Amino acid sequence: MTMKNQPVKNKKLNISTSQETKILRRIVDITSSELDLDLVLAEIVKIVTEVVSADSVFIYLVDDKHENLVLLASKTPHSKELGKINLKIGEGITGWVAKESKPVAIKKNAYQDPRFISFDVLPEDRYEAFLSAPIVYKNKTIGVVNVQHKKPHDYSPSTINLMNTIAKQVGGVIESGRMYSETKKKAIQFDSLVKVSQTITSQRYLDEILNLIVVVTAEMLNSKICSIMLLDEKGEELVIKATQSLSEEYKKKPNVTVKGSISGEVVTSKRPLTIYDVRQEQRYKYRDLAVKEELTSMLSVPMIVKDRTIGIINVYTKTPHHFSQDEIDVLQMVANQAAVAVENTKLMEEALRAKEALETRKLVERAKGILMKMNSLSEDSAHKLIHKKSMDSCRSMKDIAESIILMDELSGNKRQ
């Protein structure tokens, strides 16, 4: 049953005008004194509980994509369910209220309403009476506040009107809390990106750099596991090179083939990919491990350098999560920086190998000259002798050449 807004009749509610003013003042006070979204929602729950004397109060907010309502606050402790329970706009009574932006009041048998959707984890689903009001900000529904009673309860038009008024008033408070939370989140992300940049430009070894990146990234995106996987030399498999996971089973999981895998799709397409629940995704090859490790949502981005994919970075959340575009963009920036670090390290290693090869060649040439002079050998015979000695002694030609040069220098000192 839906009810239209009607003027508040204070006598029926036993709420005086001064009491109403106090309620609205408390809402204003929240704006000026508290910015954290979780605390803002907790205060709103308290206000609604006191005004309506409710047995249960829930607050759902519309997600970033404006597709779902997410349970973010409740009167009774539901810490495990907060952030996990999602309703599509239009789904259930709550979804209907969000879509139509109208209140709903049901005085008994709420669970028999054809729009009702049950969640086994919420005992409040068995409550009799149900009152739901849209939370509105700038003529746009941003959430829903639900009130429930264990016994049948006749919600008067004045009660519905008061709830509707409160829901509209708290819209601005909630948006302020959201903006603060987003600003705080972006500040943390910026600090994390600075740490990643500092790590990449440091003189650390590649393994240490990659391990620091996954730790910082996991903290930044509040993920359970973050891992960096690089392509093998043939470009056919992805190998885990760094992860902050403590699970040995996860660390030792088999390499992922590029062909036919989700990770491989990210490599070939060079585009980010998100999966809401890997445990239900048929293409995900390690669903059993995901269940065991409590991995749910996944974001995978390619590590690209010079228009070439060299690996991927994966992050997993413990609870279902819709990754925002900001989160995807931030992880892509980290991935690109990590790709540069990997590429620079490879170039440095190649330069060192080239330098070492040149030094070895100079030493071997010098040793050959000594053998040619001492034993009247040809250049080819001297080279073969050094090579044979290297093979027989399992030492490098550089070591053999250095020994020949040292012996020649010692002999020269004796002759002097």
Image: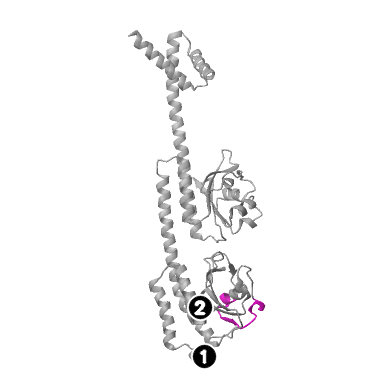
Residue matched to label 1: 12
Image mark for residue 49:
2
Which stretch is magenta? 96-115
Report the amino acid beneath label 1: Lys
Q: Can residue 170 be seen in this view?
A: yes
Report the amino acid beneath label 2: Thr
Distance between mark 2 and mark 1 Cα atoms: 18 Å
Image mark for residue 83:
none
Where disc 1 sits, the SS reads helix
Where disc 2 sits, the SS reads helix
Q: Is residue 61 within the magenta segment?
A: no
Q: Which residue is drawn at 41% across and 14% down?
A: 407
Q: Earlier in the sequence, mark 2 or mark 1?
A: 1
As rendered, which of 70 and 300 lies closer to the eye?
A: 70
As rendered, which of 196 and 52 lies closer to the eye?
A: 52
- The reply, left or right, for residue 190 in relation to residue 13 is left
